Image: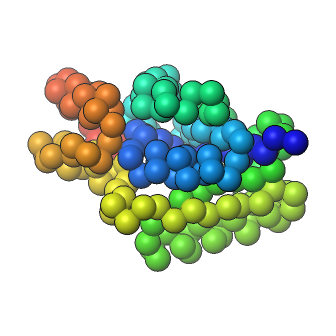
Amino acid sequence: MKTCAVYPGSFDPITNGHIDIIDRGLKLFDTIIIAILYNPAKKSFFTINERIDMIEQSLKQFSDKIEIDSFDGLLVNYAAQKKATAVLRGMRAVSDFEYEFQMALMNRKLNKNIQTVFLMTGLKWIFTSSSIIKEAARFGGDIDNMVPDYVNKKIKEKFNKKHTPLNT
Ligand code: PNS
C-alpha cells in the first residue's frame, strides 16, 4: 500500500525551509499532498493561485510524488477524504513546539487515525519563515538562498507594485 501524508500550511510563500521538509518527508512517504489552507478571514500576501504556481515552479524535481491542493475546514477531515494517514509538519526551534503540540493533540482528538509526524528542518533553515522573509524583502533585504529564485522574483514583483500592504 502506498503511504500518503498531507503537508498543510499557509505557504505564503513557499520557502526553502518548506522544500527541505518535503524532501525529507518523501524519504518516508510515497506521496505528499501540499495543502494550502484557504482562510478568507486571514489576509494573505499571495493569492491561492499564486501560491500554487510558486509551489509548482519550485518543486518540479518532485512532480511525480507530490500533489498541490488547497483546502478549507478541518485539516483532519481533508486528510481523511484524501486517504492520507499522516499530517507532516516541520519543526524549527523550541518556539514552534507549543503551537505544534496543541495542534497535533487537537487533530488527534478529532481523528485518532491520523498521525502527526514532525520532521526537523535542516539547520540552515532554522530561522526561515515566510513572514520574516517578506518583512526583510519589503525593506529591500537580501532574501537570496532563502526562497527559490522564482519565488524571490514574485516577491520582488509584488513589492514593486505600489501600495502593496504587508498583511501577514
Ligand atoms: O503554515 P501555518 O499557517 O502554520 O499552517 C497552519 C495550518 C494550516 C496547518 C492550520 O492552521 C490548520 O490546519 N488549519 C485548518 C483548521 C484545523 O484543522 N485546525 C487544527 C485543529 S483546530
Q: Quadrant of residue 115?
A: bottom right
Q: Position of residue 88 (x, y in %)?
A: 64, 54
The answer to whether residue 94 is visible is: yes
Query: Does 100 sit left or right of 95 as displayed?
Result: right
Q: Position of residue 55 (x, y in %)?
A: 47, 31
Q: Is residue 120 above or below residue 153?
A: below
Query: Does 53 sit left or right of 77 as displayed?
Result: left
As rendered, which of 37 and 118 lies closer to the eye?
A: 118
Write the residue at 71% across / 61% down.
116
Query: Does 37 sit left or right of 135 as displayed?
Result: right
Write the residue at 87% across / 57% down.
113
How many numbered discs?
0
Q: Quadrant of residue 54?
A: top left
Q: Is residue 123 above or below residue 17?
A: below
Q: Position of residue 66 (x, y in %)?
A: 62, 33
Write the residue at 29% across / 48% down.
146
Which part of the image, by quadrant, shows the N terminus? top right
Query: Does 74 sit left or right of 20 as displayed?
Result: right
Q: Position of residue 60 (x, y in %)?
A: 48, 27
As rendered, which of 133 and 168 lies closer to the eye?
A: 133
Write the residue at 49% across / 69% down.
96
